[in-house]
Amino acid sequence: MSEAAGRPLRVLGFAGSLRQGSYNRALLRAAQAAAPDGMTLESFDLAAVPLYNGDVEAAGDPEGVAAFKAAIRAADGVLMVTPEYNHGVPGVMKNAVDWASRPPQGAALAGKPVGIIGASPGITGSARGQSQLRQAFEFTNSFCMPQPELLVFKAHEKFDAEGGLTDEPTRQFLTRYLLALAAWIRRFATA
Ligand SMILES: Cc1cc2nc3c(=O)[nH]c(=O)nc-3n(C[C@H](O)[C@H](O)[C@H](O)COP(=O)(O)O)c2cc1C
């Protein structure tokens, strides 16, 4: 049995959108509210993470990057909430993953269990963005939960003007998703 079995799981969530009215940021807040007993879900704002630049990295991680990597390291698992841009992963999310994949030996994301969810006003609910994001974890050697998938489609119909999740089926599925993620993370938690 892992040591984490006796204490709350620490999960770090971040959304791949910087805009205040973001459906994905709203989905992350809804996930925080729906986190099951035995799981704490903290959020990290990717606005603090600058564009990846190898020269900057060579001089030392900027403060926001160092904080981001430290938050991932301190977590038992990660929840990424991604929009879909042009059938792929938005730069904000991919940039964050790129920083957290460095250095390749001992990267913050290496060996980390990961869940991916996302929202879009379209009918595919960020499906292609999520699929593309998964590919990155082949290289980072992270353990991305295969199922279930949470695709919040027609997101504009499921959140109110304040970003509150109003769709009860989505909330119920989100709760089931988080329970599955907790079980997934416990498979890998060691400390
Ligand atoms: C550059 C750009 C490309 C987009 N491409 C897609 C897309 O391929 N599929 C999709 O479902 N929505 C697409 N959208 C719409 C986004 O899903 C929508 O703007 C969404 O609200 C973004 O997520 P957010 O609300 O978390 O900021 C695109 C939006 C932008 C700005």
Image (cartoon, rainbow, N blue to C red):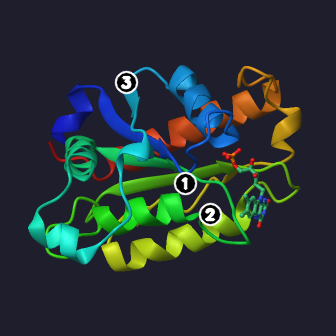
Front in this rendered view, residue 8 or 49: 49
Report x, y in % for residue 186.
33, 44
Q: Kindly identify the amino acid type of the residue bearing the numbered disc 3.
A: Gly
Quadrant assignment, res 116: bottom right
Q: Residue at x 17, y 58 (%)?
A: 61
User: Dot 3, how many residues are within 10 Å of its Cα: few (below 14), some (14-19), or many (20+)?
Assistant: some
Quadrant assignment, res 90: bottom right
Q: Which mark is residue 116?
A: 1
Q: Kindly identify the amino acid type of the residue bearing the numbered disc 2.
A: Gln
| Residue 183 seen in render | no
| Image quadrant containing the C terminus | top left
Q: Residue furthest left?
A: 59
The residue that label 2 is drawn on is: 130
Q: Which comes before the other along the chain, label 3 or label 1?
A: 3
Q: Is mark 2 in CB contact (under 8 Å) with mark 1?
A: yes
**For discs 3 and 1, the disc positioned in front in the rendered view:** 1
User: Dot 2, how many residues are within 10 Å of its Cα: few (below 14), some (14-19), or many (20+)?
Assistant: many
Report x, y in % for residue 93.
50, 59
Instruction: In the rendered view, tell whether residue 94 sits above or below residue 15.
Output: below
Asked which secondary structure carries label 3, the reply is loop
Asked which secondary structure carries label 1, the reply is strand
Q: Residue at x 80, y 23 (%)?
A: 160
136 to the left or right of 7: right
Q: Residue at x 25, y 33 (%)?
A: 5
Q: Residue at x 29, y 68 (%)?
A: 101
Indicate if the residue with disc 1 has its beta carbon within 8 Å of ligand 1. Answer: no
Report x, y in % for residue 95.
43, 65
Instruction: Give the Cα distance between marks 2 and 1.
Output: 7 Å
User: Dot 1, how many residues are within 10 Å of its Cα: few (below 14), some (14-19), or many (20+)?
Assistant: many
Instruction: Give the Cα distance between marks 3 and 2.
Output: 26 Å
Asked which secondary structure carries label 2, the reply is helix
The residue that label 3 is drawn on is: 38
